[in-house]
Amino acid sequence: MIKALLVDDETPARSELRFLLAEHADVAVVGEAASAAEAIELARDLRYDVVFLDIEMPGLTGVEAAPLVQERREPPAVVFVTAHAHYAVEAFALEAFDYLLKPVDPERLARVVERLRERTTEDVTPVEKIPVVSGSRTELLDFDQVHYVQADGDYSRVHTYDRSYLCTSSLGELEQRLGPRFSRIHRSHLVNLAKVAGVRRAGPDRIRLQLADATQTELDVARRQARLLRERLGL
């Protein structure tokens, strides 16, 4: 999903652009601003991939605001939208992603969206590493190194073959990040299914997993998770 911020001091202009973008199912307008100052304020709270930025506005112009709304670790694409063609050279000097003239032509906008799709696909390639604390430094673990994760208050503890590390992400956050190869077997445990070496019964409708780590860790599976886990393991 491409998340867009619209910045224009004219309400009809924002409404028209929102209407045109609605034709593209993978574009979501996550915010609107009537001035550069408001856009800069929104930029602190919103996550977005592109800002459609008017140039002639009261206070800061779009050209002046562009570097400010891009002050983030992963800067958004800036698409200037204006009724004045003479700003084009100045806009591209700021490394603008594109430049649209009002009234915005739907076909021209469609080409911009297509380029944004390509940019977004390139930028969101997942990095399969987890930052963990090791002494006074941070290490990055590959997903495949992780055998299981255990809740540790608001944080979590990541267990590899023969070590464990503190991670400042919660168990829920890591569950989303690690993806389908991991399974939540209990409120407090998340397991890499590729590291399961054995399964044994632990009572009626209860099973216990044995992992392929150095100590052959055994973890109980919550009753409500047992059925789904059996299916995923082909039992």
Image (spheres, rainbow, N blue to C red):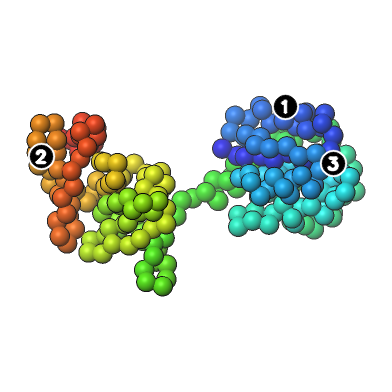
Residue that appears at 66% across and 28% down: 22
Question: What residue is drawn where x is 33% and y is 53%?
Answer: 152
Asked if disc 1 and disc 2 are in contact, CB closer than 8 Å, the reply is no
* Helix, strand or loop at mark 2: strand
Badge 1 amino acid: Phe
Reading the image, the residue beneath label 3 is 82
How far apart are labels 3 and 2 at the CA level? 68 Å
| Residue 157 appears in the figure | yes
* Nearer-N-terminus badge (1/2): 1
x, y percent for residue 212: 17, 55
Comparing labels 1 and 2, the label whose residue is closer to the camera: 2
Which of the two labelled residues, at mark 3 and mark 2, occupies the earlier sequence position? Answer: 3
Q: Which mark is in front, 3 or 2?
A: 2
Please, what is the three-letter code of the amino acid marked with disc 3? Thr
Residue, disc 2 = 202
- Residue 80 visible in the picture: no
| Circle 3/circle 2 CB separation < 8 Å | no
Q: Nearer the viewer, residue 11 or 235?
A: 11
Identify the mark at residue 19; answer none if there is no mark: 1
Left or right: 224 with respect to 204?
right
- Give the percent coordinates (x, y) of residue 60: 85, 51
Where in the figure is residue 129, as x and y percent of width and height? 40, 57
Please give the name of the residue rendered at 24% of the width and 31% of the height, measured from the top-left corner.
224
Residue drawn at (88%, 49%) of the image? 59
Mark 2 is surrounded, within 10 Å at the Cα level, by few (under 14), some (14 to 19) or many (20 or more) other residues, namely: few
The amino acid type of the residue labelled 2 equals Ala
Can you say whether 235 is above or below 156 in the image? Answer: above
